[in-house]
Image (cartoon, rainbow, N blue to C red):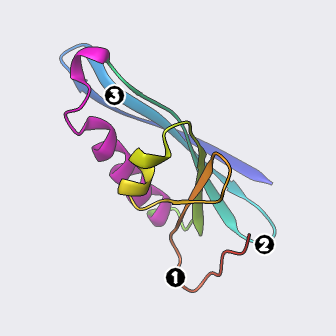
Amino acid sequence: MKTTKYSISIKNDDIQIASLVLYTVTLRSRKLACIEEVKTHEDHRNKGHATRLIKIAIEQARTLGADVIELCTRYPEFYTRCGFTEDGNVRMRFGLNSGHVIKW
């Protein structure tokens, strides 16, 4: 199993406005991407920064050949607006490879 980690952030001068961590895990059956630590500075919330980072992370995962992105959240409404689907728990997925069937 091979894991690669990426930090993605938006900065204004020396202030980190928003950030997240994207990592990929190469499994025997698929290449999985995970998003964690999505944070936005409180003075910059509700301005679309986190949405922009999620879109960047989705494109990065696609470029890296991931089949699916997973994340855990207490705020599924935000991620469903970004295209993720719920699995009935706190985990959400975004299918990247349309030919790859995701079964729960």
Place of residue 79 in the rendered image (x, y in percent of width and height, measured from the top left): 44, 50
Mark 3 → mark 1, Cα distance in angstroms: 29 Å
Q: Quadrant of residue 20?
A: top left
The magenta region covers 42-62
Residue on which the image places disc 3: 18
Mark 3 → mark 2, Cα distance in angstroms: 33 Å
Q: Quadrant of residue 15?
A: top left
Q: Are marks 3 and 1 in contact (CB under 8 Å)?
A: no
Q: Which mark is residue 29?
A: 2
Mark 1 → mark 2, Cα distance in angstroms: 15 Å
Q: Is residue 14 above or below residue 56?
A: above
Type of secondary structure dominating the magenta stretch: helix
Q: Secondary structure at mark 2?
A: loop
Q: Secondary structure at mark 3?
A: strand
Q: Nearer the viewer, residue 49 or 10?
A: 49
Quick one: label 3 or label 2, which is nearer the N terminus?
3
Q: Amino acid at mark 1?
A: Ser
Quick one: label 3 or label 1, which is nearer the N terminus?
3
Residue on which the image places disc 1: 98
Question: Considering the image in quadrants, where does the N terminus appear?
Answer: bottom right
Place of residue 90 in the rendered image (x, y in percent of width and height, measured from the top left): 64, 45
Q: Secondary structure at mark 1?
A: loop
Place of residue 41 in the rendered image (x, y in percent of width and height, measured from the top left): 32, 18
Q: Is residue 6 above or below residue 87?
A: above
Quick one: label 1 or label 2, which is nearer the N terminus?
2
